[in-house]
Image (cartoon, coloured by chain):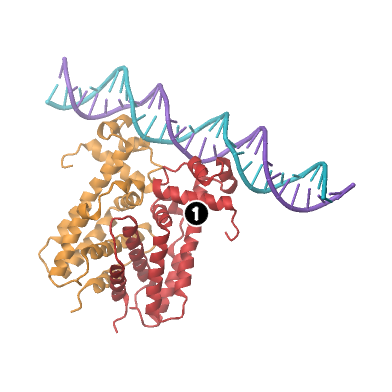
Chain colours: A red, B orange, C cyan, D purple
DNA sequence: CCGCCCCAATTGAATGTTCATTCGGTTTGC
DNA sequence: GCAAACCGAATGAACATTCAATTGGGGCGG
């Protein structure tokens, strides 16, 4: 992952863009190849099959998201601030990477996702769980299962990002703050 | 919609089940036909194309969801109770219709959804908006845009249903109540 | 520094399969 | 008997994947 050939990266990028606008069906390998500026055969030098390409791309994308979580959740500020940062950081990341967002959504709701591990072994959720666990320990959050907190928070971020990304709803920054505040009101320990 | 031929209904049902387990790709018309107990040609008697079949199935499914919203949101009880009913009603509906849930998710994150109307013209959201509008009028909810309230509520239902349906997370009824309570805490007007 | 060799990277035409869709014909209901 | 509903083999296009042939670069003996 660290040192990736340019071609491989180009294949990833093209796949994500094409899947975003055309879906898994709708994006033949030949098109991925043309779009990435390589020959069809080259793709098979890097990936065993279309399925493997998709699966690896998902892992690759997920690592980027995990990096955001780790960056924002690690800082040493009061939990509330950290939570706001994490939420905004993820939201911004998805806004800036809308093909990733879309690819993600298609992947998790497709049969490709059958191979996904249970929540406990999913690195993304593991990191999130730890974060919410900390919030509970510090008394900032209601003593509710971190799974629940993580799921609700994550879904609020995704649904907000999807809404604005799809153009079906426009939100100004004041409204974003409102959303974030609503979520926080729901999960925070009343003081 | 009211009077649908048995074959048409069987085609809808088979399509939903197959798409649930195999995705849009992965479900050839020939398989839909076999599964529904009709000939391939028969499908084309009812639908112009595969795309049209999928699109009509989405409308058909959406109407069922809208029916749930109308049933639960119309009753003449205090808003809070009504909200709880609506949330639980939708959650239960998705639990009992997991192929529909899965089909829905795949549809909205696929390019098929390009043809969806903006939120304002989407009947599902129109009904939801009206419901939340009422909550604000009655002073039960914070004065936040109904779009936001509707989107957040909807996403919390869907993500909870998805989690349990996928088997990645199991929730007992106490935890469900907790979730519902968290959401309500977030959006309710402080009393 | 040169020439040579090796192997990984790359190519894209060819292959075989899968699929959506068609259509000529048959059945069914009225 | 005539429409509408239904059938399913046939058609042709699209696609994933393969593979024989080409390229390029870098190590190494001279």
The picture places residue A18, in percent across and down from the top left corner, at 44, 47
Chain designation of label 1: A
Q: Residue placed at 38% from the left, 38% from the top? A: B28
The picture places residue A12, in percent across and down from the top left corner, at 51, 52
Query: The C terminus of chain A is located in which quarter?
Result: bottom left
- D25 or B188, which lies in front? D25
Task: Residue B135: name its quadrant.
Answer: bottom left
Q: Residue placed at 32% from the left, 47% from the top? A: B114
- D2 or B108, which lies in front? B108
In this view, the residue farthest toward the bottom is A191
- Position of B57 with respect to B25 (left or right) is left
The picture places residue A186, in percent across and down from the top left corner, at 29, 74
Q: Does A162 appear above or below D3?
A: below
Instruction: Name the residue carrying label 1.
Output: A57
- A176 or A70, which lies in front? A176
The picture places residue B152, in percent across and down from the top left corner, at 28, 64
Q: Residue placed at 60% from the left, 46% from the top? A: A45
- Residue A121 seen anywhere in this rendered image of the structure: no
**Mark 1 residue element:** helix
Query: The N terminus of chain A is located in which quarter?
Result: bottom right
**How would you rate the neighbour count of disc 1 (Cα within 10 Å): few for under 14, some for 14-19, many for 20 or more?**
many
- Position of B145 with respect to D14 (left or right) is left
């Amino acid at each position: 992952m660290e040192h990736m050939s340019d071609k491989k990266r180009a294949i990833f990028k093209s796949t994500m863009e094409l899947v975003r606008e055309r879906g898994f069906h709708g994006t033949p390998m030949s098109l991925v190849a043309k779009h990435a500026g390589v020959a069809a055969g080259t793709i098979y030098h890097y990936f065993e099959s279309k399925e493997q390409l998709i699966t690896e791309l998902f892992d690759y994308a997920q690592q980027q998201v995990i990096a955001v979580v780790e960056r924002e959740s690690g800082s040493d500020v009061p939990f509330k601030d950290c939570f706001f940062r994490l939420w905004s950081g993820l939201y911004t990341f998805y806004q800036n990477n809308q093909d990733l967002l879309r690819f993600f959504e298609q992947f998790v709701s497709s049969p490709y996702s059958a191979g996904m591990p249970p929540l406990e072994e999913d690195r993304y959720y593991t990191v999130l769980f730890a974060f919410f666990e900390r919030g509970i320990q510090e008394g900032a959050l209601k003593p509710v299962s971190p799974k629940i907190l993580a799921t609700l928070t994550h879904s609020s971020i995704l649904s907000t990002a999807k809404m604005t990304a799809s153009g079906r709803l426009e939100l100004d920054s004041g409204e974003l703050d409102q959303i974030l505040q609503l979520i926080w009101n729901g999960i925070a320990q009343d003081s």
